[in-house]
Amino acid sequence: MSSTTTAIILAAGMGTRMKSRYPKAMQRLGNRPMIGHLLETAQHSVDQIIVVVGPGMEELTHYVQPHQTVIQTERLGTGHAAKIGVSSLTEGKAVILYADNPLLTEDTMQRLLEAHTHDNKLSLLGMRPHNPGHYGRIIVDQKGMVERIVEYKDATEAEKQTTLCNAGMMCADVNDLKRWLAEITPNNAQNEYYLTDIVAFAAREGHVTCVEGGEEELAGINSRAELAQAEARLQDRLRIHAMEQGVTLIDPASTFLSTDTKLATDVTIEPHVFIGPGVTLEEGCLIRAFSHLEGCHVKTNAVIGPYARLRPGTLCHEETHVGNFVELKNTTLGAGSKVNHLSYLGDSEVGTRSNIGAGSISCNYDGVFKHKTMIGDDCFIGSNSVMVAPVKIENEAMTAAGSIITHDVPAGALAFGRARQANKLEQGRALQAALKKKKERG
């Protein structure tokens, strides 16, 4: 018998309670579509993955590549979707998963797979949530073996008192699944083909085992409120993992991490920091309060913030300083360089040990094209300098405060790009007096 294990992920639902034009599986958790979490978990436990999608879900189909997709053209229930998912399989075992259970851990999935032995016809996942609500109930016999699952809408009042709830996921041999799925009929309150009906068929032929897991990883996501609850659980998981790896979170509850955030040892993150997708922080970095980072790489011992924003394409080398109300976009900041306050650098390259004065900006966009600003090593950019790209400021050059730099600055030069100051004697006092009289007249 083949030992191939296939994961069938049911992802055709639109999630009407989400009130979104996007498929439910593409709603984001930790800055990743929720199905992405499940794909990563499944990839470590199975040999292949098949995703059941609905018609018109091109974005979802593209996202799950290179995994195979099949289309459920009519949404006739979970049993119908599972039947489509296993239709191309001929042997091995299959584990059926739901895209709206993204927090399933690898450990729990492995326990589900290991529970499927020759003694068990079917293994399934169950949980005992704090509020069982509208979950389907798992009905067991006196020996603790599963007899059937009853959906909440079809349950009697006595069955609704059962605390063991169906988490949806189950595992069985492919040919057994095909046979059971062919028997399902839509004789229920929803007039749908329920996947849960196969549990009774399996129990008729042999043992059905329930593997219990925690609500924090098995609870389904069907609404924006439940999505927010799942986000909170995921953030707790990410924060704990970060701290276990040697990261200091001053106030974990106010730190937002992304699933792909890469954090080295001795990174310190102060309160109210948002880390979006694609961020790498190397050893010894300090991210100060109220900073926002995405798509950036910060190297050893750099200090970012407070109130700094690093946008995609930004690279801050060793021991750089990016201070309050500074924004960098697609910019490389060389080792030891500083941009300490109130500045914007976009599409720029700054060499080593350069200092960018307060209020300085690179004008990188002409309304059609983006242009590059090049600043060399050991440069000093005076406060309120405006660098109109494309422009190059070579090593050890300086710009005077308040300058508009429109031409390249040679190495070691001092560039003035401002009008000459003229002092008009007594004109200031006279102007003030005139303005006051005007104000008095109303």
Image (cartoon, rainbow, N blue to C red):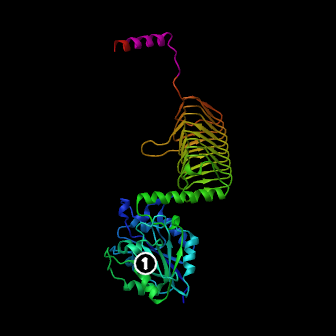
Residue 257, quarter of the rendered image? bottom right
Q: Residue at x 52, y 83 (%)?
A: 143
* Left or right, residue 107 beside residue 198: right
Q: Main secondary structure of the magenta part?
A: helix
Give the quarter of the figure containing the N terminus: bottom right
Q: Is residue 435 magenta?
A: yes
Position of residue 427 relative to residue 317, above or below, is above
Q: Picture coordinates of residue 267 (x, y %)?
A: 65, 51
Residue 45, quarter of the rendered image? bottom right
Q: Picture coordinates of residue 367 (x, y %)?
A: 42, 43
Q: Nearer the viewer, residue 215 or 246?
A: 215
User: Would you name the residue on which mark 1 appears?
Assistant: 149
Q: Amino acid at mark 1?
A: Ile
Give the quarter of the figure containing the C terminus: top left
Position of residue 131 relative to residue 116, above or below, is above
Position of residue 102 relative to residue 374, above or below, is below
Q: Residues within 10 Å of mark 1 (few under 14, many from 20)?
A: many
Residue 139, quarter of the rendered image? bottom left
Q: Picture coordinates of residue 159 (x, y %)?
A: 41, 75
The magenta segment is: 420-437
